[in-house]
Amino acid sequence: MRRYVIGLALLLCVLPLGAQTDRREVRRGNREFRKGAFREAEIDYRKALVKDSLSLAGEYNLASTLYRLEDYENAGKALETVKEVAPASAYASDYHYNAGDVALARKDYAAAVDAFKASLLLNPGDLDAKENYIYAKKMLENQQNGGGGGSDNQDQNQDQNQDQNQDQNQDQNQDQNQDQQDQNQDRQNQDQDGQQPQPQPNISRQQAQQMLRAIQAREKETQDKVNREKAAALQSRQKEKNW
């Protein structure tokens, strides 16, 4: 609720003198409410109602307190108790506004639309009431059309579905591309494995003889090296023996 606590002095002006026995408890409840001590404020307002069950200030402010405590069911009941008196008082616009807030919290959008409309008729310049009226009307239309959670939830679900579809398509495309690459690589490997040896380039007889001589010379060098190593080893053994 936007308008939480009624100014007690102003409210008492519209009450009979015999109904002022709740003044002390209501004032104490107002102080607790302003401090955010809503449980303590609730107790004080209920004490005021024990002394005077017709206390407009006690019942109205109790409804505001219960709203803050998110006890919307009992907040609605408290406002229902003063529905015959509050609309005829100087606080009629505030009463309808708060009734609209409670109805919104209870998702009773039809009642919320009626309440904010009544508040606007009494106070056409109330921009908050106008915004809430538009919102409540939109929610009511969604509810009547079977929208349930409203267009915001529908848009969010659509965005989530689009994101999921995009991710799935991207994953599928990546998998397909990877599979294609693997298949191409496998075919390339198979082609290489099954490839016939390439024929050696043709060389002249002279080139072949030169290559053969080079190979023979290399073999001779290797053989000569082995022979030298054997001779050196034999000579070393002879020295050792003579010594």
Image: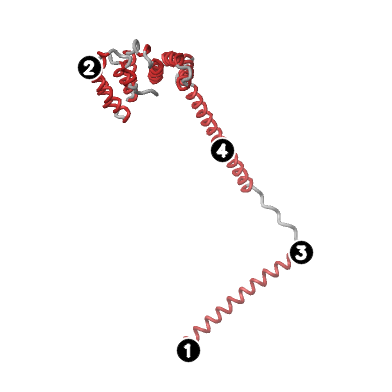
Residue 14 horizontal/vertical position (percent): 33, 14
| Frontmost residue, 122 versus 214 | 122
Instruction: Point out the frontmost of discs 3 and 4.
Output: 4
Residue 38 horizontal/vertical position (percent): 30, 27
User: Does residue 198 appear left or right of residue 72 in this picture?
Assistant: right
Give how far apart the Cα atoms at labels 3 and 2 are.
132 Å
Quadrant where the N terminus lies?
Answer: top left
Which of pointers 1 and 2 lies earlier in the amino acid sequence?
2
Task: Please give the residue where the numbered disc 1 appears in the rendered image.
Answer: 242
**Above or below, comparing residue 33 to residue 118 in the picture:** below
Instruction: Point out the frontmost of discs 1 and 2.
Output: 2
At 64% from the left and 74% from the top, the residue drawn is 220
Indicate which disc residue 205 carries.
Answer: 3
Task: Please give the residue where the numbered disc 4 appears in the rendered image.
Answer: 174
Give how far apart the Cα atoms at labels 1 and 2 are.
139 Å
Which of pointers 2 and 4 lies earlier in the amino acid sequence?
2
Q: Amino acid at mark 1?
A: Asn
| Circle 1/circle 4 CB separation < 8 Å | no
| Frontmost residue, 4 versus 218 | 4
Which of pointers 3 and 1 lies earlier in the amino acid sequence?
3
Instruction: Point out the frontmost of discs 3 and 2.
Output: 2
| Frontmost residue, 112 versus 143 | 112
Task: Please give the residue where the numbered disc 2 appears in the rendered image.
Answer: 51
Which of pointers 3 and 4 lies earlier in the amino acid sequence?
4
Say which quarter of the image contains residue 201. bottom right
Say which quarter of the image contains residue 5. top left
